[in-house]
Image (cartoon, rainbow, N blue to C red):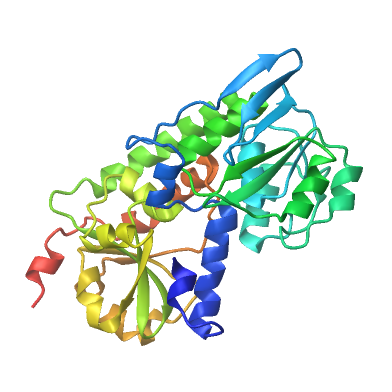
Amino acid sequence: MIAHLLQPGSAAGTIVDELTRRRLLGGGIGAAALLAAGCGSDGSTDAPDASTTGDTRTVTDDAGNEVSVPARPQRIVSTWAYGAAALLEAGAPVVGMPLSTEPLFEEDLAARHDLGDVADTGTVDALNVELVASLVPDLIVVALQGGEATADDATLDSLRAIAPVVQLEVFQSVESLTATVADLTGGDAAVDAAREEFDAALAQLRELLDVAGLSVSFALHFAPDGVYTFAPDGIPAVDVLTRAGAQWLAIADEAAANGGDLQLSLERVSDLSADLVVVYNLGDADLTAVDVFAALPANAASQVVVLPETHQAVTWTNYTALAEQLTEIIAAVTPLDPNVVTEAP
């Protein structure tokens, strides 16, 4: 993972660790984690194991715990901010969640949802358990990261004393997460509508990338001496491009084998040399001062595009926003030349 590849306390580490935190707490995707979550190669997932009994039912959460939950929860607290985004997308009655995760995420939530009656429960590292109790929830959602709880045993015990606690895995596909959330809350119709919006936005992006022989690479810039690239489903923006038919270079498979992401030194810049290079410029660096990008053939051909910074929520609404952003920035450099690399000197 990213954080394991950087020296603690370095400037590069600070920037990329922030993205890692967003991926973990915000629901980034990893190939190995998709398998662990039980998703097929087509993105499908088995329905949660649940049996209905009166007004409650028993579900088996991603931690393997059998939990008795309301058949239709009325007051939900999520200690996982991006999990709360999935709940809100499904139309679930969220009464508490972390509301100070990151500015872009907060702005997006406020634009899409009425959060006037949603209490800020604090971050996962500083959860206000007393406030959670005062909200009288009938369901609490907590994140797992690669099967590991994000809350310690004492906190989980405190939360279970308040309401049923369901733990959901951060590293899973958007299909899997939204299906689980819809099952928990009965929000299938809302999720289906959000999925349809994404499919429409994806069709436009797919049309732009439907160029025979066009190769694509993705780079996260964070320092003058290196970049990161990702597996085909490594983060939402890359997953959206994959779904749109992007033809990745072999380095994407290496990133997948590395757990979802891979740091490249300047000596391996050629591994990013594709006809179209999509850059996620986290930290808003001056790319003109970075030799690695100046050396890319796609840069000389004006086929390096920069994705505006966005949050990493694994929801259909965020996937739709990413598809629309990618369509806008790629459309600005069309028609795309599929011979940039082969024609480079």
Q: Position of residue 155 (x, y in %)?
A: 78, 53
Horizontal side, residue 102 vs residue 119: left or right? left
From what the image shows, is residue 323 above or below residue 21?
Answer: above
From what the image shows, is residue 225 above or below residue 166?
Answer: below
Q: Is residue 131 visible?
A: yes
Q: Is residue 97 visible?
A: no
Horizontal side, residue 161 vs residue 240: left or right? right
Q: Position of residue 277 (x, y in %)?
A: 29, 65
- Residue at image location 27% in from the left, 62% down from the top: 254
Quarter of image, res 304: bottom left
The C terminus, quarter of image:
bottom left
Q: Position of residue 335 (x, y in %)?
A: 22, 55
Farthest residue, direction top: 54
Quarter of image, res 133: top right
Q: Position of residue 66 (x, y in %)?
A: 65, 31
From what the image shows, is residue 123 above or below residue 79?
Answer: below
- Residue at image location 46% in from the left, 72% down from the top: 4
